[in-house]
Image (cartoon, rainbow, N blue to C red):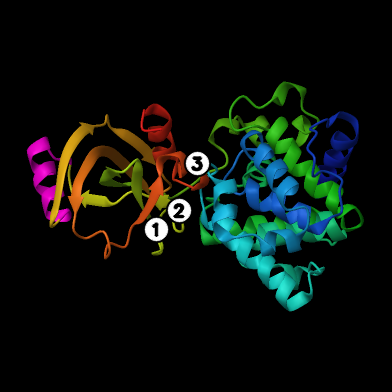
């Protein structure tokens, strides 16, 4: 039996007979909409990304609409989805398509992959789904399906493993049905060959699946890297004056770039109230203030970081630095117009500031 041929034919038959995973971007040929969906679904589950896709299509039905939108508006629309570099790259790429290509989306893999924020997976997805070009996608679902069926034990996060999986995926694709094949393998991994409790007993691949035949389903695919998360401690100063708060915009590279937050004191370890007050006093030089409340601890876990956040609500009595501080004074009623990191959103929803 030609195992590779069996895999491709069986996958396409499964897709034709049983796949009912409906999504608004499936089957369309609009490259802008496909690209938008793929960027949103990077690091995001379909269930979480779907409402964002619908919002973006409604607000920006064309790439020109996205390119012409203010950055703060784009970031606000993305708020809560995380991995905000995707939104910045999306906006930047839209502008480049309008400026350099008169709004015409690139139609070759080589040009698509040049867009900011687009890697091999996204380029392959857009090229195949929008233009029927024979480029195989390789995402988490594909790694899992191929690793199990072919019994590949190389770590999917290793250079050697990535190379082997990419080569195998390209060998398997039906070049005349590229879009159908790519959609099928992603859907099969998401719906049938799932990370936990895959439906092996009802699987068309059962007779030739190495992981099933050798009892390795639970250990494949394999990863080699263990991520050590850095612990950080943020104390936010929620400075209130004249029914307004002071905001800062995170313009430096790093987490939450171009999102808004409050003036921040970051320390190496959790501190007590006395130490906190001393830090605030140093931070608010020449100011008269009183601490009204210290919030509970909030937590946000990122890919490589764990952040503990505490919000210190402060009433400013007098501030001689009003004219020189690089802070933005915003009416409390207008806070909803600004994009914040998820932990700050939670704090604002829990709090009676507004």
Residue sitting at the far bottom: 100
| 2 or 3: tag closer to the N-terminus | 2
Question: Which secondary structure, mark 1?
Answer: loop
Label 2, on which residue? Answer: 259
Spatial CA distance of label 1 from label 3 is 17 Å
Q: Position of residue 143 (x, y in %)?
A: 63, 46
Quarter residue 342 falls in: top left
The N terminus: image quadrant: top right
In the foreground, 189 or 117: 117
Q: Which residues are magenta?
A: 270-284
Whether residues under marks 2 and 3 lie with C-beta atoms below 8 angstroms apart, the answer is no
Residue at (61% x, 24% y) in the render: 197
Residue at (92% x, 56% y) in the render: 176
Q: Which mark is residue 250?
A: 1
Q: Is residue 84 left or right of residue 143?
A: left
Q: Position of residue 23 (x, y in %)?
A: 78, 37
Label 3, on which residue? Answer: 336
Q: Residue 340, relative to residue 348: is it above or below?
A: below
Spatial CA distance of label 2 from label 1 is 6 Å
Whether residues under marks 2 and 1 lie with C-beta atoms below 8 angstroms apart, the answer is yes
Q: Residue 341, relative to residue 108: is it above or below?
A: above
Question: Which secondary structure, mark 2?
Answer: loop
| Residue 217 within the segment the image draws in magenta | no
Residue at (61% x, 49% y) in the render: 42
Q: Is residue 114 left or right of residue 88?
A: right
| 1 or 3: tag closer to the N-terminus | 1
């Amino acid at each position: 039996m030609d195992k590779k041929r069996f895999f491709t034919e069986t996958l396409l038959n499964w897709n034709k007979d049983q796949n009912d995973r409906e999504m608004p971007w499936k089957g369309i040929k609009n490259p802008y909409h496909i690209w938008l969906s793929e960027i949103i679904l990077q690091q995001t589950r379909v269930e979480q990304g779907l409402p964002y896709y619908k919002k973006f299509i409604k607000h920006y039905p064309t790439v020109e609409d996205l390119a012409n939108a203010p950055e703060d508006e784009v970031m606000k629309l993305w708020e809560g989805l995380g991995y905000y570099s995707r939104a910045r790259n999306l906006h930047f790429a839209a502008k480049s398509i309008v400026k350099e290509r008169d709004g015409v989306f690139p139609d070759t893999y080589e040009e698509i992959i040049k867009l900011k924020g687009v890697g091999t997976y996204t380029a392959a997805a857009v090229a195949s789904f929008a233009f029927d070009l024979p480029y195989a996608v390789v995402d988490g679902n594909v790694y899992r399906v191929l690793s199990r069926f072919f019994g590949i034990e190389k770590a999917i996060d290793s250079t050697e493993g990535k190379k082997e999986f990419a080569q195998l995926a390209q060998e398997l694709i039906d070049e005349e049905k590229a879009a159908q094949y790519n959609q099928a393998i992603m859907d099969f991994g998401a719906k049938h060959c799932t990370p936990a409790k895959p439906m092996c007993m009802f699987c068309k691949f059962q007779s030739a699946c190495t992981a099933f035949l050798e009892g390795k389903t639970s250990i494949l695919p394999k990863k080699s890297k263990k991520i050590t998360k850095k612990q950080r401690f943020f104390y936010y100063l929620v400075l209130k004056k004249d029914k307004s708060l002071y905001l800062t915009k995170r313009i430096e590279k790093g987490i939450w770039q171009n999102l808004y937050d409050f003036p921040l004191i970051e320390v190496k370890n959790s501190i007590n109230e006395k130490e906190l007050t001393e830090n605030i006093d140093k931070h608010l030089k020449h100011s008269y203030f009183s601490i009204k409340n210290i919030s509970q601890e909030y937590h946000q876990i990122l890919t490589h970081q764990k952040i503990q956040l505490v919000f210190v609500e402060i009433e400013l009595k007098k501030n001689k630095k009003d004219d020189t501080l690089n802070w933005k004074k915003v009416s409390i009623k207008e806070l909803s117009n600004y994009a914040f990191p998820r932990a700050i959103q939670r704090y604002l929803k829990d709090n009676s500031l507004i």
